[in-house]
Image (tube, rainbow, N blue to C red):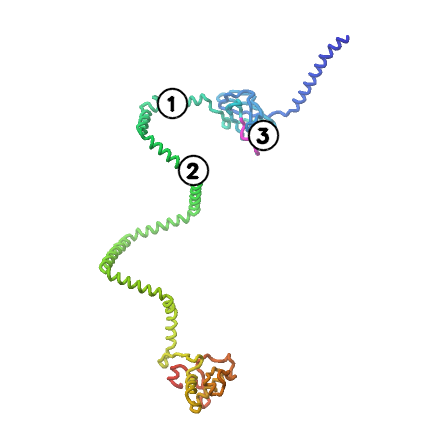
Amino acid sequence: MPGRIQRWRRPLAAATVLVIAVAAGAAVWRHEPPQRRVVAYFTRAVGVYAGSDVRVLGVRVGEVEKVVPQGRVVRVEMRYDPELRLPAGAQALIVPPSVVSDRYVQLTPAYTGGAALDDGARIPVDRTAAPMEIDDIYAALDEFNRTLGPTGANADGALSDLVATGRANLDGNGGNLHDTLDGASRALATLSNGRGDLFGTVVNLQRFTTTLARSDQEVRRFQQQLADVAEQLAGEKEELARALRNLAAALGDVTTFVRQNRTALTSNVTALADITTVLVRQQQAVIQILDVAPLAIGNLNLAYNPRSGTLDTRDNPLGPYDPATFACSLMVAQLPAAEVPAICTKLAQTLRQRGLPLTDQLRKLLKLPPGAPAGSGSSPGSISSPGAPTADQAPGGSTIPSDPTLGGILRGPA
């Protein structure tokens, strides 16, 4: 009995472990989120099978479930990680094998935001691509050879003639061809080194054209004005031609005149050069004359006295003193005091009373020290300007206007 019980315990334990493992697997299977699915249609799907990788940015995110041909296209059903998002406009590409991997389906581009691809979405043929097969390359090369062959472009010997002509042209021109290729290489290198300047020129040209486009109205107006000028010149072409003919005749006369009078013109130009040299040296004097001459002519006009027909000048040899003061000062200096006219004494008293300047001779006549101030007649503010006409007292007490100018002296009392 104990042996039988032990024999039954071992299968029971194994069955119990199996049941627990199945239950755990079922629990795990129930909690795994369902994977997303997408269907893509390709023109061909060579090398893609159920179980092939589905990648995004080269990282495996799922696998191919089915590859089913449907008419002229191939339907490829795929599933991928449920947590992965793809853009709504995603594309499907079959990537050819590399050294370490077989062909796989690449979903591109990676999701960066916006609308996402729905679960179970379909990617049409215009958003899928398959690599070119080696058989396609061979077929294209074969078609190219047949096109150039005797049944194609060389049916009439055109290709043979082209090769023969090329051989004849290149025969003996290897050095020239080498120099040409070397020059082209250097030119390309120069362009590459100066690409900054080249692109800068292009940018500036683009800015210039943009400015012209913005100034389209002004450019049109300028062109219209230029057209108007051209039209006006065309309308006056006869007058312009006549003027040019007259100018040609005048230039001929001038040439003849210069040729016949070359010696005289040379001497005149030399003399003119001397004159201009003198004028340059006396530039300041000329400038001063041009500045003073108008003032002198104006003063001469103002000095003319139409009543007496004289040029009235107001000489100022003694500063602020008028001619009467000057004459009396001379008489006081040359004559004894008893012989000095009484009018000079009266003139000195009048000048002192009015506060006008006195010479040392008139101060001596009034027994004043030399340089002593004049009498306190009127204030300095009321002193009239030197040499201005003054009013004298006549013996009868009436005021006699006096004119100290040369015309007034010659004319006498009014």
Q: Disc 2 designates what residue?
A: 192
C-alpha gap between disc 1 and disc 2: 37 Å
Q: Nearer the viewer, mark 3 or mark 2?
A: 2
Q: Residue at x 39, y 74 (%)?
A: 299
- Total number of numbered labels? 3
Q: Quadrant of residue 14?
A: top right
Q: Nearer the viewer, mark 1 or mark 3?
A: 1
Task: Indicate yes or no whether the magenta region holds residue 387.
Answer: no
Q: Nearer the viewer, residue 239 or 59?
A: 59
N-term-proximal mark, 3 vs 2: 3
Q: In the structure shown, which secondary structural element does the residue marked by tag 2 occupy?
A: helix
Amino acid type for the residue under numbered disc 3: Arg
Q: Tell me: residue 300, above or below residue 363.
A: above
Image location of residue 68, percent across then percent down: 53, 20
Amino acid type for the residue under numbered disc 2: Ser
Amino acid type for the residue under numbered disc 1: Asn
Q: Quadrant of the N terminus?
A: top right
The label shown at residue 145 is 1
Q: Are marks 3 and 2 in contact (CB under 8 Å)?
A: no
Q: Are marks 1 and 2 in contact (CB under 8 Å)?
A: no
Image location of residue 240, percent across then percent down: 28, 54
Residue that protrudes farthest toward the left in the picture: 260
The label shown at residue 85 is 3
Q: Tell me: residue 2, above or below residue 260.
A: above
Magenta region: 106-113
C-alpha gap between disc 3 and disc 2: 44 Å
Tag 2: Cα neighbours inside 10 Å, few (<14), some, or many (≥20)?
few
Q: Quadrant of residue 143?
A: top left
Q: In the structure shown, which secondary structural element does the residue marked by tag 1 occupy?
A: helix
N-term-proximal mark, 1 vs 3: 3
Image location of residue 278, percent across then percent down: 33, 65
